[in-house]
Amino acid sequence: MADQQSGETGALLNESAGRLFGSFDEKDVRAVEQGEWPDAVWAKVQDAGFPLALVSEAAGGFGIASAEAISLLRIAGYHAAPVPLAETMLANRLLSEAGFDVAEGPATVVVAETGAFALAKHGGNWRISGSAAGVPWARHAETIVLLVGHESKLFVVRLKRGVASIAPAMSFANLPADDAAVDAEIAADDVRPAPANWTSQSLKAAFAALRVSEMAGALARVMEITVGYANERVQFGKPIGKQQAIQQQLAVLAGQAAACGGAADVASAAFDSLDVIAIAAAKVRAGEAASIAAPIAHQVHGAIGFTEEHRLHFFTRRLWGWRDECGSERYWSKVVGQAAIAAGADGLWPFVVSVGAGQGA
């Protein structure tokens, strides 16, 4: 009964998300890409409670399965929602599991290599120093969350607005991806031991799982836009979608969209256990899908697909940007490859079939 109620709640959330994200238009997306903060858009998202979707009911969240919560991001990706929803959802999950209150307002997470930041005791407080590039939405975040090591232990650090110095920058997707540097004293209550399952790599994997869901939504929209255009664009007296060459391209595009959707299912199901290998494989497959599908979409559209005025680029740029965020195909392929080598000759096949097993694969 509990699972049924959770499923019904998830379905209602998805329906609500579809209406909400569908109400945003291109001017909202363009405003963010020009450096504006979408205050009215974010207020609606926050009022809906979506930033708390990955938080337990006891901590103020919805108390639904993580896979259902993450499906919100697929809808957000489908609509190119110009808000830091994935970032805030993940930040709140990490904060709540470490015993913090959830963030008030937008938040983000720093995915940095081990040693990028340093913690030191400073009287009854802490001193933190370090820097990271490409922190999504950092300039707009009320809270920045990161994992930092100290004396062979990991800690969750909460940086309140104004503690870090932010140098604005933009990602390939033309979304905020800022450089953040900090050298400051912070209160003792802003540093807490990290739960055992959270490491630098598992944090990157968790973020990657959310990105894969966003990619699945964006790629589904790319396919929809491209098929629609092929059926509307008439050449030599018939829609170009009737041409065999175009039909073959659309078939490949549809296959990649389906593969990305399957990868999102695997990554979402692996989120709670932080199954790094399953998420790694999903991120690699999603990246491959983006690399194959996005060029096809632009080829089918021809010159118009490359114009600023056409909406296609909102989604293809996000696909290309998200493909390399939270670990590129090269990074996660290496992780999977190293695990396969470690399994040895006798363990290789069991390793292969175990990846994603029970995760909806």
Image: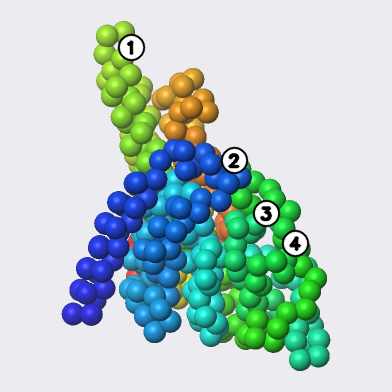
Q: Earlier in the sequence, mark 2 or mark 3?
A: 2
Answer with mark 2 or mark 4, whichever residue precedes in sequence: 2
Instruction: Please tell me which of labels 3 and 4 falls first in the chain.
Output: 4
How busy is the neighbourhood of tag 3: few (under 14 within 10 Å), some, or many (20 plus)? many
Q: Is residue 240 visible?
A: no
Residue 118 locus on image (x, y percent):
77, 75
C-alpha distance separating marks 3 and 1:
45 Å
Foreground mark, 2 or 3, reads: 2
Disc with the residue nearer the chain's start (2 vs 1): 2
Label 1 residue SS: strand
Residue underneath mark 1? 235
Q: Nearer the viewer, residue 257 or 184?
A: 184
Query: Residue tagged by mark 3?
Result: 178
Kindly tell me whether residue 103 is visible in this rendering.
yes
Q: Residue furthest left?
A: 1
Three-letter residue code for mark 3 = Asp
Tags 3 and 1 touching, CB below 8 Å: no
Label 4 element class = strand
Callout 2, which amino acid?
Gln
Q: Earlier in the sequence, mark 3 or mark 1?
A: 3
Question: Which amino acid is tagged 4?
Answer: Ser
Where is residue 141 shown, x and y percent of the image? 60, 62
Q: How is the image coloured?
A: rainbow
Task: Name the residue that disc number 2 marks.
Answer: 34
Q: Secondary structure at mark 3?
A: strand
Earlier residue among tags 1 and 4: 4
The local crowd at label 1, few if under 14, some if 14 to 19, many if 20 or more residues have their Cα within 10 Å, is few
Please tell me which residue lies in front, 190 or 245.
190
Mark 4, residue position = 165
Q: Quadrant of residue 68?
A: bottom left
